[in-house]
Amino acid sequence: MTEPYTCRVEVRWADLDLLGHVNNTKYFEYGMEARVKFYEHCVLHPDGVRRPALVLRKADMDYLRPILLSSGPLTIETWVTHIGTTSYSIRHRMRDKHGELCAEGSAVMVGFDLKQQKPRPLSDEERTALGSYLMSNV
């Protein structure tokens, strides 16, 4: 792939704080929604069977401009920046309906064995699927 994965996320009235803009914690929820859509898009089996579990190790966000109720729907671009043995790193860009950059974030996702309650290696299939969105400078 030469382009990031792109999805849309609605801005909900309940996301707003007393100042009338989206509360800072909601940006992380938008990132989570984009990560789930991204993972389902590139790693979900055609028959709908889910892949082994992943857990969030780290997430951060740079707030660049306020998101208002009228800003949506947001367009969120997601791409992979690193693939390790048990984890991968991704970046997000959140843009309002006019294409203005509102936030940038990153996350580290870890393959997780639910039975043994410890990290698991990413499968070859996961690595291949994630690798198709591996980009260094976007």
Image (tube, rainbow, N blue to C red):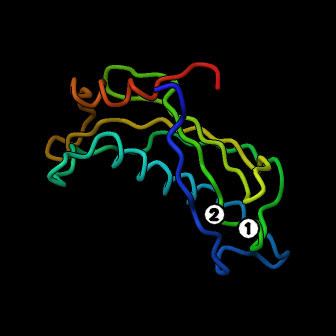
| Quadrant housing the C terminus | top right
* Residue at (37, 30) in percent of width and height: 130
Q: Would you say 71 lies left or right of 5 here?
A: right
The residue under the point 66% across, 73% down is 15
**Separation of disc 2 and disc 1 at Cα?**
7 Å
Pick the residue in front: 115 or 75. Answer: 75
Using a 10 Å C-alpha cutoff, classify the residue at mark 1 as few (fewer than 14 neighbours), some (14 to 19) or many (20 or more): many
State the image quarter where residue 85 is shown: top left
Residue 28's spot in the image, x, y percent? 59, 55
Name the quarter where the N terminus is drawn.
Answer: top left
Q: Which mark is residue 26?
A: 2
Tell me where residue 131 sits by quadrant: top left
Disc 1: which residue: 22
Q: Residues within 10 Å of mark 2 (few under 14, many from 20)?
A: some
Instruction: Name the kind of residue labelled 1 in the image.
Output: Val
Element marked by disc 2: helix
**Residue 106 against residue 16 in the figure, above or below:** above
On screen, 72 above or below 37? Answer: below
Above or below residue 127? Residue 41 is below
Residue 98: x percent and y percent?
A: 78, 56
Circles 2 and 1: CB atoms closer than 8 Å: yes
Residue 89, given in percent of the width and then of the height, sits at 48, 30
Question: In percent of the image, x 47 and y 22: which residue is there?
Answer: 82
Residue 61 is left or right of residue 82, and the answer is: right
Q: How many marks?
A: 2
Local SS, label 1? loop
What residue lies at 78% left-to-right and 69% top-to-bottom?
A: 68
In the displayed structure image, the side of residue 106 where residue 67 appears, left or right: right
133 left or right of 110 in image:
right
Q: Where is residue 137 shown, x and y percent of the image?
A: 64, 20
Specify the label residue 70 is tagged with.
none
Label 2 amino acid?
A: Lys
